[in-house]
Image (cartoon, rainbow, N blue to C red):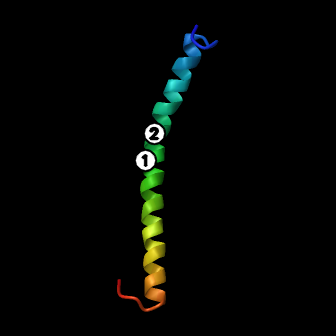
């Protein structure tokens, strides 16, 4: 027992973390791509060629 939880609860928490990491990475890539597209739209909207 560690911090009041049995070993199987820690294994469940670890399993959930391992499953969620790829989804977080995918979300972060999508979010940065979306932000870049928004920034690009603003530049094009005002005629900036940056």
The residue identified by callout 1 is 25
Residue 4 image point, x, y percent: 64, 12
Are the residues flagged by discs 1 and 2 in contact, CB closer than 8 Å?
yes
Point out which mark residue 34 bears: none
Q: Residue 43, relative to residue 14: is it above or below?
A: below
Residue occupying the point 56% across, 14% down: 8
Residue occupying the point 52% across, 19% down: 11
The single residue placed furthest to the bottom in the displayed view is: 47
Which image quadrant for residue 10? Answer: top right
The residue identified by callout 2 is 21
Q: Residue 25, relative to residue 4: is it above or below?
A: below
For label 1, the crowd category at 10 Å Cα-Cα, with few meaning under 14, some 14 to 19 and many 20 or more, is few
Quadrant of the image containing the N terminus = top right
The single residue placed furthest to the left in the displayed view is: 50
SS type, badge 1:
helix
Q: Residue 9, relative to residue 31: is it above or below?
A: above
Residue occupying the point 48% across, 74% down: 38
The single residue placed furthest to the right in the displayed view is: 4
Residue occupying the point 55% across, 11% down: 7
């Amino acid at each position: 027992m560690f911090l009041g939880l049995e070993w199987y609860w820690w294994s469940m928490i670890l399993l959930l973390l391992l499953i969620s990491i790829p989804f977080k990475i995918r979300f972060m890539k999508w979010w940065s791509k979306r932000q870049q597209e928004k920034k690009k739209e603003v530049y094009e909207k005002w005629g900036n060629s940056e």
